[in-house]
C-alpha cells in the first residue's frame, strides 16, 4: 500500500489546507486548529445519535462514524477532522474480547500474560475493518478540502489496556512484563505495532490525509526504558506510515522527557501536552513541527483569559517550523461547545505580532 495517492491529488482544496501546510512546516495563512476528542460527549448532537448505541457498536457503523466525525467540523469549522473510532477498535475487530465501558474506558475480558496469549491475537487485515474503509471514503468525499486525520494507538498505550485488563494509573503489570518477561513483551509489542500500522494503512488508502499515533501513557516511562523497550516498536509503525506520504503526528501525555525520542521515532509533528510550555518543548523536538497545547481546562475560564492564553500558545509556536494548535489533551466532556467555538474563531483570526 506504499503507492497511496498523495493527499493533494485527492481533492484540490487539500493543497491549500493550513493544517497540512503547518504539519509539513510550510507557511500558513493562519495557525490551523483542531481538537483531540472534538467529537464526543461535549456535543449534544453526539449524545443524541449515540442514544442506545454502544461505543464500539457505533465505531463499527460507517454511517454513524461519518456523522459523528463531521459534527465538530460543522459546528466549529476546525481545520481538520479526526476519524471517530477508538484505539482499541482494531483489537475488537480481530476478535479480542473487550468492551468500552462508559466513564471507565476499555476493559479486556482476558488480559494478556503469556506468549500463547499474544499468539492467540490475529494480525489485522483490511478485511477485518471494511466499515473503516467505507467510513473514510464517505468522509473524505463529504469533507472536500478539509483533511481527515486517521489514528491508531501506539504499542505501549494499547499494551497497557491488554495487559492490565483495563485503565490503569501505574501501568504496573505492563511494566512488570516489560522488565521481567522480555520475550512476551517483544512479541506483544510487535503484534500491536503490526496491527496499528495496518490500521493506519487502511485509513490512508481510503483517503485520510494525515495520521496521529496516540501514545497517551508513554509518560509513565523513563527515557531509557522508552528508548529500549517501546521506541523501536512505535518507530516501526511510524516508518510504515511514512511510506504512505502523509504527515505523522506523535502524541503522548506527561512526555516532557520523551519529546526528543518521540520525534526521533519518526514523527513529522510532535504533540505536546499542556504541562510543557511550547517554548520549552520546541528545542527538544529536533526541528520538527509541534502540535498543542492549551490546557483543556482553560476552556472553562472566562473567554478573555482563555484567548489570552491561546495567544501565548500561538506566539510560542512560531519558534517551530510548523505549529498546529490543539488542546494539551482531549476535550473534557463537560466543555461548553460555544466556548470551544469562540476559541476556534480566535485561533483562526489571530495574526502574529510583528517582531
Ligand atoms: O474526536 C476524537 O478525538 C476521535 C475519537 C477518539 C476516541 N478515542 C473516542 C472515544 C480517539 C482519538 C480516541 C483515542 C483514545 N482512546 C485514546 C488516546 C487519546 C487520549 O485520550 O489520550 C485512549 C487512551 C483511548 C482509550 C479510551 N477510550 C478512554 C480512556 C476512554 C474514555 C472513557 C470514558 O468514558 O471517559 C475511551 C472511550 C471513548 N473513546 C469515548 C470516546 C468519544 C467515550 C465513550 C462514549 O462516548 O460513550
Image (tube, rainbow, N blue to C red):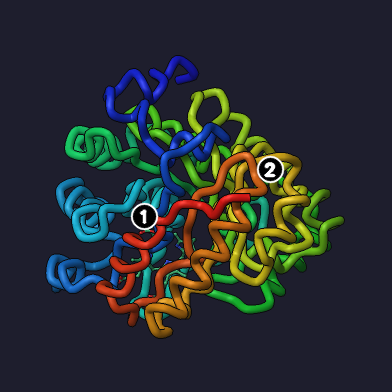
Q: Is 296 placed above or below 39 here?
A: below
**Disc 1 secondary structure class:** helix
Helix, strand or loop at mark 2:
helix
Disc on the earlier residue, 2 or 1: 2
Q: Quadrant of residue 288?
A: top right
Please, is residue 212 above or below residue 202 in the view? below
Name the quadrant of the N terminus: top left
- The residue that disc 1 covers is 349
Q: Quadrant of the rendered structure where residue 114 is? A: bottom right
**Which residue corresponds to the image point at 26% horizontal and 59% vertical from the top-left?**
76
Tell how many labels: 2
In the image, residue 316 lies at what x, y percent? 63, 58
Instruction: Find residue 145 and report its horizontal and vertical position in percent.
Output: 27, 34
Residue 309 percent coordinates (x, y): 52, 72
Q: Residue at x 36, y 50 (%)?
A: 82
**Residue in front for this viewpoint, 181 or 223:** 223
Amino acid at each position: 500500500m506504499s503507492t497511496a495517492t498523495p493527499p493533494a491529488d485527492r481533492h484540490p482544496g487539500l493543497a491549500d489546507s493550513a493544517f497540512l501546510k503547518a504539519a509539513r512546516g510550510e507557511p500558513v495563512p493562519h495557525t490551523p486548529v483542531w481538537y483531540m476528542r472534538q467529537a464526543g460527549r461535549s456535543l449534544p448532537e453526539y449524545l443524541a445519535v449515540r442514544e442506545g448505541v454502544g461505543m464500539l457498536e457505533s465505531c463499527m457503523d460507517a454511517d454513524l462514524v461519518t456523522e459523528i466525525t463531521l459534527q465538530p467540523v460543522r459546528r466549529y469549522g476546525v481545520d481538520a477532522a479526526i476519524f471517530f473510532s477508538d484505539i482499541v477498535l482494531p483489537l475488537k475487530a480481530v476478535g479480542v474480547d473487550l468492551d468500552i465501558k462508559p466513564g471507565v474506558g476499555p476493559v479486556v475480558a482476558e488480559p494478556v500474560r503469556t506468549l500463547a496469549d499474544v499468539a492467540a491475537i490475529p494480525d489485522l487485515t483490511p478485511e477485518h475493518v471494511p466499515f473503516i474503509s467505507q467510513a473514510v471514503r464517505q468522509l473524505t468525499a463529504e469533507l472536500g478540502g478539509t483533511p481527515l486525520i486517521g489514528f491508531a494507538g501506539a504499542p505501549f498505550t494499547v499494551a497497557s489496556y491488554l495487559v492490565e485488563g483495563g485503565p490503569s494509573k501505574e501501568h504496573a503489570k505492563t511494566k512488570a512484563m516489560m522488565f521481567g518477561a522480555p520475550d512476551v513483551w517483544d512479541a506483544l509489542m510487535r503484534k500491536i505495532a503490526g496491527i496499528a500500522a495496518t490500521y493506519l494503512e487502511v485509513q490512508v488508502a481510503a483517503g485520510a490525509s494525515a495520521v496521529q499515533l496516540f501514545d497517551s501513557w508513554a509518560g509513565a516511562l523513563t527515557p531509557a526504558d522508552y528508548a529500549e523497550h517501546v521506541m523501536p516498536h512505535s518507530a516501526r509503525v511510524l516508518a510504515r506510515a511514512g511510506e504512505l506520504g502523509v504527515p505523522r503526528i506523535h502524541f503522548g501525555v506527561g512526555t516532557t522527557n520523551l519529546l526528543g525520542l518521540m520525534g526521533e521515532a519518526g514523527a513529522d509533528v510532535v504533540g505536546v501536552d499542556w504541562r510543557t510550555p511550547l517554548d520549552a518543548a520546541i528545542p527538544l523536538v529536533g526541528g520538527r513541527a509541534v502540535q498543542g497545547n492549551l490546557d483543556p481546562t482553560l476552556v472553562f475560564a472566562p473567554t478573555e483569559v482563555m484567548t489570552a492564553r491561546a495567544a501565548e500558545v500561538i506566539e510560542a509556536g512560531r519558534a517551530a517550523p510548523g505549529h498546529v494548535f490543539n488542546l494539551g489533551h482531549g476535550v473534557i466532556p463537560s466543555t461548553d461547545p460555544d466556548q470551544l467555538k469562540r476559541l476556534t474563531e480566535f485561533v483562526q483570526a489571530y495574526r502574529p505580532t510583528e517582531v
